[in-house]
Image (spheres, grey):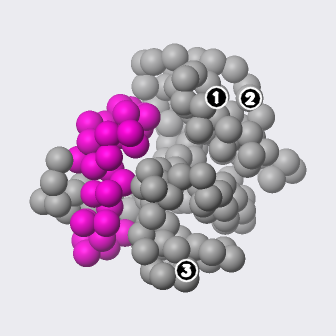
Amino acid sequence: MTAEVRTERLIIRDWDISDADAALGIYGAEEVARWLTPQMHAVRDSAAMRSVLHAWIEAQPNLIPPAGRWAIVRADDGELIGGLSLRQLPPYDEDFELSWQLRPDAWGNGYATEASQAIIAWAFDQGIEELFAVARPDNDRAIATARRLGMEWVGETDKYYDRRLQVFRIRPASA
């Protein structure tokens, strides 16, 4: 994404190394990391978070558009509250997955839905024909967000990440 995407309350922008301490509040939180697919352990400290961000920033220009990873920032106070990604799902890199992660103290405010709606619209403007979200069957929050986004449940599979996941899909006509 070459420019920021803005919503009424949020700014979606590229990650920066200076985001490491704030990002640690997201990816260092066990209650967030436990749901990441593939499962990622909580990032342990700022140095490790800087390494993760460095890898994401370096990879960004080489991803097949519209894939990417972005920071979610509240517009009113500039506080980094989450992350979004569009990436190709394994094993065949045919399907694009939308995922969102928020700091636990930002849950319940509609930020994941708002940011995801903006990225969905942006991705469809880039020519993507459908996006998927995958969630563990017991991840009620992610499943509820996928439904709020207008994503349709298409079943369960272990095709992605070698674990049983609920699969949701959205196409431009339903966005």
Mark 2 or mark 3: whose residue is earlier in sequence: 3
Q: Amino acid at mark 2?
A: Trp
**Residue 36 lies in magenta, yes or no?**
yes
Name the foreground residue: 40 vs 109: 109
Work out which residue is located at the far right of the displayed protein and give it. 173
Instruction: Classify mark 3: residues with Cα within 10 Å, few (<14), some (14-19) or many (20+).
Output: some
Measure how far apart labels 2 and 1 are at the Cα level. Answer: 6 Å
Q: How would you rate the neighbour count of disc 1 (Cα within 10 Å): few for under 14, some for 14-19, many for 20 or more?
A: many
Residue 156 in the image: state x and y as whole percent.
63, 18
Crowding near pointer 2: few (<14 within 10 Å), some, many (20+)? some
Residue at mark 3: 75
Q: Nearer the viewer, mark 2 or mark 3?
A: 3
- The answer to the question of whether label 2 and label 1 lie on touching residues, with beta carbons closer than 8 A, is yes
Please identify the quarter of the rendering in which residue 161 is found: top left
Mark 3: amino acid: Ala
Q: Is residue 156 left or right of residue 70?
A: right
Instruction: Pick whichever, 171 or 146, lies toward us.
Output: 146
Q: Secondary structure at mark 2?
A: strand
Does the stretch in magenta take in 117? no
Measuring 32% from the left and 46% from the top, which residue is drawn there?
A: 29
Compare marks 2 and 1 and give the one earlier in the sequence: 2
Q: Secondary structure at mark 1?
A: strand
Q: Is residue 165 left or right of residue 78?
A: right
Q: Earlier in the sequence, mark 1 or mark 3?
A: 3
- What is the magenta range? 15-43
**Residue 25, image x and y in percent?**
32, 57
| The disc label shown at residue 167, or none | 1
Give the spatial CA distance, label 1 vs label 3.
Answer: 31 Å
Looking at the rendered structure, the number of numbered marks drawn on it comes to 3
In the image, is residue 100 above or below residue 4? above
As drawn, the label of residue 153 is 2
